[in-house]
Amino acid sequence: MFWIFTAILFSIAVGFVLLPLWVRNRAESFVEDASRKNENIALFQERSDELENELASGNLDQAEFDVLVQEMQQSLLLDVSDEELAANGKTKQKKSSAAKSTTYNMAIPLLLCLLMPFVAYGLYGEWGFKRDVEMMGLFQRTVNNRDNPQESQNLIVSLGELVQADDDRPWAWYFLAENFASIGMFTEAEIAYTQSAARMEETPEKALVLGRVAMAKYILAEFSFTADILEVIDEARAINPNEVSILQLIAADAEEREDFETAIEYWRLIIQSNPNSEQAQILRRSITLAQQRLAGDGQDVAVGPTIEIDLSLAEGLELDQNLRVFVAVRNAAQEGLPPLAAIDLTVADLPMNIQLDNSHAVGPFNIASAETVFVSASVSFSGSATPSSGDYRSQSDNFSHNGQRAVISLVIADRVP
């Protein structure tokens, strides 16, 4: 089917090139013949006007005038006939030059058109992504595969054939590893992940694959860190310090060892990568539970300041329940910085009691980094966290949290001018 469509498109492309050339040659020939005949007629008309002037001035009598006009008419007919005969006679003579010119004009574009698909396919085979396109079906099947061991086995066979035919395909190795891991073949998965990473440049994608390598090694090491695993972790974090799969692995190991302080540290880094995700909400609950465990063991827990916000809409204010609401704690001493902590919800969630702490940080600074802060809440019609004209917004006065809990009430009532 691919080649059929290619042939059809190629034929259309050739038609776009050759048809205008053929039409132009035909038009030039027609214009040349018409121009020659028009010149003869113009000469006849000019001479006729001269004779009529001579007749009117008395230099010619009617008989002489009639004879001369008849001779000119015969001459015009002979000229047209002679030109047609000459054109026919010339056709052999001219055809050779015209044919040569036409052939020359048509041959080169035709040759280029014929060469075009071979050159295009040659260059695409050299520089294009044909091999990757051919693999997309297998990759998509891997992504869509959920708890289907038979499908994973079929994909392992197909992807295995690909890497055997050409082992310099990092993503083929990666998806082969994914299928190995899905059926619990972690030794094979670790090998395939390693092969994939070895063929990648120093990009965030490689850090992601190294995270998979570390995870497979961690499982094979019975959920304990080894020198080999730590080396892979260091390599991945040298490329991308915030690679989520690595942070998850470190946090999971710390939680397994009941090192809750380390687990909290890395959970907070994961939250910062996507603070509004479902995973971030789960990790915030994990942080709270870990802090309770630490406090129950008599350890000092550096919970940090907490801002409790009672947020509601003004009485009588009716808004679309699906509009997004952005709540942020900002540094009162420095304008233009990212929020110290933020969360978003919808109008349907209001009224609501919200608690923001250091785990809700969305940038390099958290609430504890500022002594004086303020809280803002906005309802956005555009879906953007930056308020624009027509949005509703409310903002608290500046206050000091003193590293403790602060309670703020905000009522959204005013529109942004």
Image: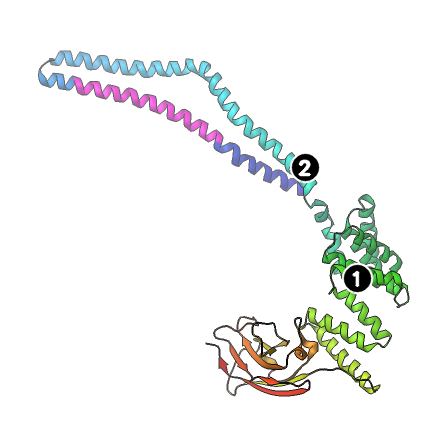
Q: What secondary structure characterizes most of the magenta part?
A: helix
Q: Which secondary structure lies at badge 1?
A: helix
Looking at the image, do the residues carrying marks 1 and 2 touch, with CB atoms under 8 Å apart? Answer: no
Q: Residue furthest left?
A: 58
Give the distance between the C-alpha atoms of the residues marked 1 and 2, in whole angstroms. Answer: 37 Å
Residue type at mark 1: give it. Answer: Gly
Label 2 sits on residue: 122
Disc number for residue 211: 1
Mark 2: amino acid: Gly
Is residue 25 inside the magenta stretch? yes
Label 1 vs 2, first from the N-terminus: 2
**Vertical relation: 119 (above or below) 203:** above
The part of the chain drawn in magenta is: 21-50
* Among the 4 quarters of the image, the one containing residue 27: top left
Q: Quadrant of the N terminus?
A: top right
Residue 352 lies, in percent from the top left, at 62, 84
Q: Is residue 389 above or below residue 109?
A: below
In the rendered image, residue 114, in percent from the top left (x then y), is placed at 61, 31
